[in-house]
Amino acid sequence: MSACKRLLYFVKHRSFWTHIRRNVTTWSPVGAAFNAKPARRQDLFEKNVGLFGVPELSCPAGFQAATKAALKNTELLVQNACSCPPGVETVQCFDQLSDGLCKVADLADFIKVAHPDPAFREAAEKTCIDIGTVVEKLNTNVELCKSLKSLLDNPDIVSQLDPDTRRVAELFMFDFEISGIHLDDKLRKEAVALHVNLLDLNNEFLVGSHMPNRIARSSIPEHLHIHFANEGSFIQVGGLHADSPDDLVREIAYRIYLYPNADLMGCLEELLKCRYKLAKLVGYDSYGHRALKGTMAKTPETVMSFLQLLTDKLSDRTAKDFKMMRDMKKKLNPCNSELMPWDHPFLSGVLRAERYNIEPSLYSPYLSLGACMEGLNNLFSQLYGVSLMSEHPSAGEVWSEDVRKLAVVHEKEGLLGYIYCDFFHRSNKPHQDCHFTIRGGRWCRETDQYQLPVVVLMLSLPHPTKSTPTLLTPGMMENLFHEMGHAMHSMLGRTRYQHVTGTRCATDFAEVPSILMEYFATDYRVISQFARHYETGKPLPESMVARLCESKKVCGAADTQLQIFYAALDQIYHSKPQNRSTTEILKEMQQKFYGLPHIPNTAWQLRFSHLIGYGAKYYSYLMSRAVASMVWRQCFVQDPLNRDMGERYRREMLAHGGAKEPMLMVEGMLQRRPTIEDFVDALVSELHPNFETFIMDSES
């Protein structure tokens, strides 16, 4: 090669060599896929396969076609379910019916919030409404219910059903019962009307709970305007600014954002009344009793016992945590040391940072997105024999070109399903980390094959730059592991029926796999396999990992107590009517279960959007964390990469979805049946300081 040609070659490939020099680490294929910018599609003539490979969904109008086809298929399946002799075939027809509607509705439910094109979002929204209306009608279809009832009322037939089929039949019957199918015509119509009203109230409250409040610019000091959004002569406050180091900014945000809205207050109170009326109409003492049937807790009384016992066990530690916060506030602001509700998140963060030096920027260079995905791949490979394989999506398959597609492949079973990773920030995308089921797994008697599950994981991470991959904070990394826990619950389940696939299980069990993943995310033996500097390749020091884990225990009791307060409030709201305002109930519960004072002219409950999706079930986070803690300590803490334990975990917990009673799954994993006291002790024991870490910190 001549000198001139060599020079041209070097100039042409300069960026490649620069990349090699700056990034000396070697990534696996899945790590490399997430640490690089997605390649732009070159073939302009490639056929559009439609969203998620559904041919109709190559354009917004396709949603109407998909809906029409699903509803036509529904009519045929209803006829089959009503005409076939009672037995396994009846339940299979019901599951096919559910699957056909869910495959369209679940996909549309995701697209309506995630697609950047408003036309797609609007078309998906219409599909959700159309299919939701049909589902409401099916839940009150007397003939359809009779076909299932004739099966369940026949002891001889029931005795011949396998456990999964019997449970799924009972769950379908439960859906009928809570819709008022057993009522006479007049009361059934009333139940349907309440359901329809609740759909509207749920949506109204959900939208309203996220709307910003505003106040005249002249009402707050001019030097603080910079912290808030301007809207002409008004200041707009769209959140609590909980991390602001300025006491006054936090207080202003708290008072304005939580200022009562009369219309939204009326909506919430009507929503709670409507839920109670519906629960009573279909035979339950309260909405809480209706919501908790089939969960680990079973009843509201059990939940309140759990919350009260946990409060009693934490009382001394919570008091110490609040004292630490008061002392810190006095240190930061000697003129105003009274601890207020807007101080808790900020001061607990300050105390953690001061004690353990856990500045996120120190960790981020070791936690590139590619490294974290490589770590997940290694973990799943060692625990379950499963690999994550990056695939290039076809034209039209994804809704944004930065979405990555993963095939989940088992070393013996082959392809288990697909995970679409919508990880990066974009305008009009919800700023929340979540898992969406697009298609559930089930055995298809029509094709004699297993229908592979498809899910989406949504995060809101920064994009990589030309010189730097996406770098995660420890919190972002934990959230990634958490959501991947949900995804693998969907992938590793092999349920016969899609009605109970993966995360379609009791709410207080559904969070166990995701929370358990957080323990793996903060274990040095796991982190040491992947956390390395994106430039130098050096591993994350063990002492930094240890400090990060121990820092969570600082103010841990107060943080847990805040969750207990939310859960208790949720329970009381969904108990029998209190004949007083939701704010009066809030004030009482805050005093009893939290301790920091209620602020007059605020209504935090109007921002409690979890009341919609987690009505009477907010306690689930605490109970799931207790179970995850017990599983971790008993099964993984000695060796987090133990394949035998990974296989047992899949066999006893992940494989069943909702096809098995949740407490039976926990019992199978722990090989004993835990009590409420065991759950409480598991949560309390997490807050014990690790003295080995203190010694290591002092030595380092």
Image: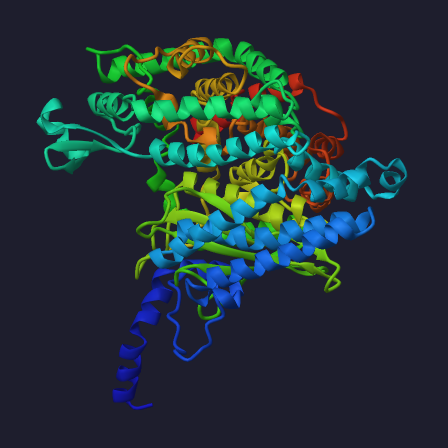
Residue 203 sits in quarter: top left
In this view, the residue in front, 373 or 257, is 257
Residue 26 appearing in the image = no
- Counting from the top left corner in percent of width and height, residue 651 is at 73, 44
Image check: 278 left or right of 472?
A: right
Q: Residue lying farthest right?
A: 156
- Counting from the top left corner in percent of width and height, residue 607 is at 36, 27
Residue 522 appearing in the image = yes
Residue 38, relative to residue 689: is it above or below?
A: below
Quadrant in which the C terminus appears: top left
Quadrant in which the N terminus appears: bottom left
Q: Residue at point 29% right, 31% down?
A: 239
- Counting from the top left corner in percent of width and height, residue 106 is at 53, 50
Residue 464 sits in quarter: bottom left
In this view, the residue in front, 427 or 89, is 89
Total tally of numbered discs in the picture? 0
Colour setup of the view: rainbow
In this view, the residue in front, 522 or 516, is 516
